[in-house]
Image (cartoon, rainbow, N blue to C red):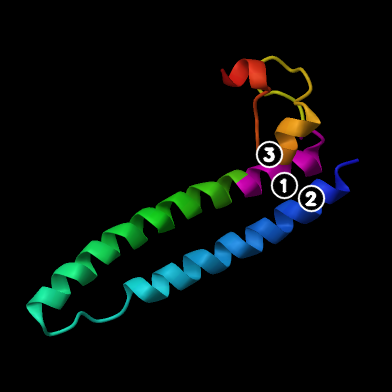
Amino acid sequence: MYEEKHKHLKELEKVLATRIESVSTDLSHEHDADSAEQVTERENEDVLRNLKEETRLELKQVRSALKRIESGEYGTCATCGEAISPARLDALPYATLCIRCAR
């Protein structure tokens, strides 16, 4: 029933895992010897760390959605038990709440 969602989530999982690897690689680079350049590099590292954490959290949600597909719980609101609308799942494929409960 949710074959397309499963496929989309698997693709998203790969994209997010690749992003985490890329950011991790960027964070592992040595700093420039120039102190002015180091300030910029450290600011960039803060942005990269935030991006990595946000991506890690999204990846966790994607993997959770994949487990819900496998268990047959996907598309059901975790709070009220009603169906999550297809439009909501299109917009946020790892949604766990219907729009009413999300508000």
Report the residue at 71% width, 52% height from top. 9
What residue does disc 2 label? 6
Of pointers 3 and 2, the one earlier in the residue sequence: 2
What residue does disc 3 label? 91
Is 73 in the magenta? yes
Q: Is residue 30 found left or right of 35 in the rendered image? A: right
Nearer to us: label 2 or label 1: 2
Nearer to us: label 3 or label 2: 3
Nearer to us: label 1 or label 3: 3
Give the percent coordinates (x, y) of residue 49: 34, 59
What residue does disc 1 label? 66
Of pointers 2 and 1, the one earlier in the residue sequence: 2
Q: Main secondary structure of the magenta part?
A: helix
Q: State whether residue 33 is above or below residue 8.
A: below
As drawn, the residue found furthest toward the bottom would be 33
Q: Is residue 101 found left or right of 48 in the rendered image? A: right
As drawn, the residue found furthest toward the right would be 1
Q: CA distance from mark 1 to mark 3?
A: 16 Å
Q: Is residue 93 found left or right of 54 in the rendered image? A: right
* Tag 2 near tag 1, CB within 8 Å: yes
Q: Residues within 10 Å of mark 2 (few under 14, many from 20)?
A: some
Mark 1 secondary-structure assignment: helix
* Tag 3 near tag 2, CB within 8 Å: no
Report the residue at 32% width, 76% height from top. 28
Q: Residues within 10 Å of mark 3 (few under 14, many from 20)?
A: few
Of pointers 1 and 3, the one earlier in the residue sequence: 1
Q: Quadrant of the N terminus?
A: top right
In the image, what residue type sits under mark 2?
His
In the image, what residue type sits under mark 3?
Ala
In the rendered structure, which segment of residues is drawn in magenta?
62-74
